[in-house]
Image (tube, grey):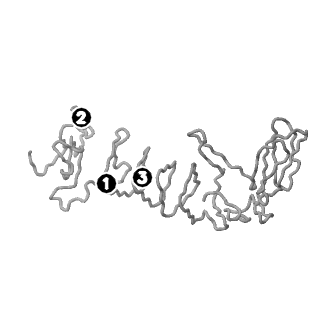
Amino acid sequence: MAKAGDFYVGSQLFCGTAEYEGVPLPPVGLGVGPTKIRGAGYIAGPLLIGNPFSFTSAPNINEANVMIGRNSNAECKPPPPSILKISSRGTVPTPIDVVIGDVLGPVGIAGHALTINMLVDTITTLTCPKTFIIGIINAIGFKVMTGAEIRAAIKAETGAHVQAGAKVRNGVEVTNGIKITNALNSAPISKSPVHIGKSTGNKSFDIPHARKKGKRIRHVCAEGPEAGIYIRGRLKGGNMIELPEYWDGLVDPETITVSLTQIGSSQDLMVDKIEWGKKVYIRSGNASAIDCFYEIWVARLINPEDLDEKLHVVYDGETPADYPGNNDNYIIGGYQ
């Protein structure tokens, strides 16, 4: 092997033959003839820089086309602290200063790092159909998510949790243990908790279909300006419907309404009388035998200890805490 001291190349440096799978392939990107770029060079590779023992395990066995190890030059004192550094110092940085693969030539990336420390001045964008992270994730700062999130694991949180916006859950939620809330969503204005915030709109429940796998059922609760309760059933061979005993003292008997659905024939049915809020008597206008379905609604007393207390359907206020009545008799659903 020939040896030389300083070696100066005034034009271009070529090391090896520029070819691909035995076919000559000149590196035209370096320029040809009068367009030749001075100071450019071509190395067929493999190229090893730095400590050879970081990569070489056997003759003609190379781990990569370009291999860079830690500096092993005994004359370099002190040795460089980094193996590889890329910088735009003195120039304006761009979003494509470092490019690994592209749309026409994607590459796989494998890494094994002791630590990874990154300081990003603007944003980090990762576009990936699926991401797997194994280990503990510690995040400091705000977290904003757009889209669905699915978790199959244990979630433990220490610290404050702030949510602005709607929160929707479909499915079963199971809590094992004690849940303590010390925040604005529970206002100590009554014996029962009052949740302060905007209503979610329709009050609904969502459950799996009882018979069809892969199907679900969603129903929406009825709403009205009263705490309405009801019973329903069938009346046949008689004319009296006995109301539940527990309604006594629970409901306002003056609000009882009765709906009747005739079965089999027209019976000209009507409510004959309601006796002391305990019994409803039905009469047939054409003296037919009575056979019908019935549905009876009644309003619960807002406060059984104060019969004059009424529900304020619309009132002035910013939160349920401004309700002009007694909040002890309500549990307000909503979200903070």
Snapshot quadrant of residue 17: top left
How far across and down, in percent of the image, does residue 62 sit?
21, 44
> Which residue is at the front of the view, 297 or 31?
297
The structure residue drawn at horizontal position 41% and vertical position 57%, both measured from the top left corner, is: 136
Q: Which mark is residue 140?
A: none
Task: Report whether 59 appears left or right of 255.
Answer: left
Task: Locate residue 226 relative to residue 3 in the image: left or right.
Answer: right
Element under disc 3: loop
Q: As rendered, which of 177 and 161 lies closer to the eye? A: 177
Q: Nearer the viewer, mark 1 or mark 2?
A: 1
Marks 1 and 3, Cα distance to the nearest angstrom?
Answer: 20 Å
Where residue 112 sits: x, y (%)? 31, 52
Front disc: 1 or 3: 1
Q: Earlier in the sequence, mark 3 or mark 2?
A: 2
* Numbered circle sitting on residue 124: 3
Query: Looking at the rendered structure, which numbered label has been put on residue 20?
Result: 2
Which residue, as the protein is rendered here, is positioned at the far left? 2
Q: x, y (%) of residue 44?
A: 21, 40
Q: Amino acid at mark 3?
A: Thr
Q: In the rendered view, would you say 316 is above or below 287?
A: below
Q: Which residue is mark 1?
A: 113
Report crowding for label 1: few under 14, some 14 to 19, many 20 or more residues within 10 A (C-alpha): few
Q: Residue furthest top?
A: 23
Q: Amino acid at mark 1?
A: Ala
